[in-house]
Image (cartoon, rainbow, N blue to C red):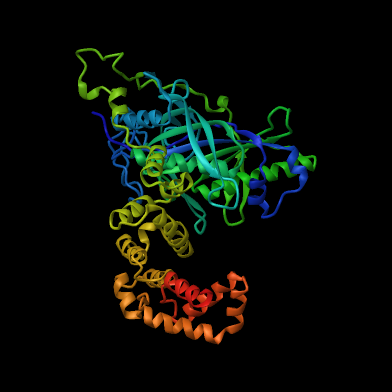
Amino acid sequence: MPFNKVMLLRGRPALLVSPVSRLCERAFSGRPAPSRFESWESVVGLEIHAQINSESKLFSSSRVQFAAPPNSTVSFFDASLPGTLPVINRRCIEAAVMTGLALNCTVNKKSLFDRKHYFYADLPAGYQITQQRLPIAVNGNLTYRHQVGTKWNEMVTKCVRIKQVQLEQDSGKSLHDDLRRQTLIDLNRAGVGLMEIVMEPDMSCGEEAAAAVRELQLILQALETSLANMAEGQMRVDANISVHHPGEPLGVRTEVKNLNSARFLAKAIDYEIQRQIKVLDNGGTILNETRSFDYKHGSTIPMRDKEGKQDYRFMPEPNLPPLILYDSKSLPPANMDPEQVVNIDLIKERLPELPSITRERLVEQYGILPEQSYILVNEDGLQEYFETVVKCSQINPKRIIAWLIKDLLGHIRLLNITIKQSPVKPIYLAELLTLLENGDISSSAAKQVFQELCKGVEKTPAQIVKEENLWLLKDMRQLEEICQGIIEGHKAEVAAIRQGNLKIMNKLIGLVQKTTKGKADPVLVKKILEEKVLS
């Protein structure tokens, strides 16, 4: 019987060619790079491994559970006991097909499984079941945007080609005990279903790679084919990097393994580019090796020589038949159990709204800028927060998005928390902006209330305004008295205004605001001052 599993992305080395950008150089050194770097081009490739969102493993009925007790979710097949055979998980097949379709791939109606041989302690069979010869999906593309300047709206659109999407099983995990000088093996992860996604050579630096990985992560989460939580190892990235002079053959590449955050991915790639340039400029040679990223020091370090295809001794998996998929043009045999049929067309119909479509909808529906839609979608939980504020108020969405980007995001990033952990509830922000929009409080008072909400107080904005007496002062008689006092105390400024220096009027308005502690309606104040000074 088929089982449910979890998905993970993994790809073979792919190369990406482009000039080494000044952005990468700044990310590496914190200052403009020397001009000698401009004579190099960088080549970057990604293998992305995403754990399939499934209840059980790829070829066994063992459950998938993060942080389960060691070796508590291991079947006889996972441990490679003699005589055990793989039974493929239907959920993993559907997840891979859906992911391929979302990435604009061609789904192969026939795909094959292979054995990839290598000998690690956490791979009990001595080989991994994967799809080397004929994967489940090929020839797709992924469009993404990334920031090229220091401002949030300085973005460019890029497209990276997807070489293939393939199914494979994960290995176990080695746990190193330095104190006892021993390594323990946990096979809970062994056999978990992965999707390996290979990107073609269309990127050039760490920021581009990180942006592409983040877009892929959003797609997988929208599809629910993978939770893609990099902190929990549900999405891991290997990067292949090389440099060469323009017009010359590609250089020798190195592979940086198991990068588990977009930030570390960008740093590792940019460091490795500059390291290789420095080695070559000093007359050295680049070794074809596998390296790891030391996040504490921000550098890559050697691990081992890089294996080639011949080292893996690929061979057809004898215990699994070809994987056959169907669509409306290739119906399955009449005597085949419908429950065993994976229909490509039906999966295509179930595709949800993808991030790119969501961004277009937000721009059209709310009249916001494309750059703002990227921030809403890319920041986990921000889109839901924004739409909740819109529903709870009658405020122009453009004003809401300005508060979200400048004030709310700035606050949560300062505290290093997520939108979902924000102490400012969407309904409170909606109430605060309504008070501001209706002219009940000034903008400075709104900022003061917002800071109180950021402290996590269990009070509504209206309660804070009442307690702090922040209501906007609109009494015309009282405002006229205050303005008259300011005019009489600043005769030189009044004379300058009457002589044509109208900019000084702002100083008088500011003095009125200071006197009223920001509670005066600036529109009324300006009107009163103009009448008294200029009439």
Q: At which x and y percent is residue 9? A: 44, 36
Q: Is residue 403 above or below residue 283?
A: below
Depth check: 369 or 488 in front? 488
For residue 479, what is the image quadrant? bottom left
Q: How many marks?
A: 0
**Position of residue 535 in the picture relative to residue 347 (left or right):** right
Depth check: 194 or 431 in front? 431
Q: Residue at x 74, y 43 (%)?
A: 37
Depth check: 330 or 258 in front? 330
Depth check: 225 or 508 in front? 508
Q: Residue furthest right?
A: 283
Quadrant for the N terminus, please. top left
Q: At which x and y percent is residue 85? A: 32, 27
**Does residue 277 appear in this view?**
yes
Q: Residue at x 42, y 32 (%)?
A: 125
Q: At which x and y percent is residue 326? A: 30, 18
**Does residue 185 appear in this view?**
no
Q: Residue at x 48, y 64 (%)?
A: 414
Q: At which x and y percent is residue 484? A: 47, 83
For residue 333, what is the image quadrant? top left
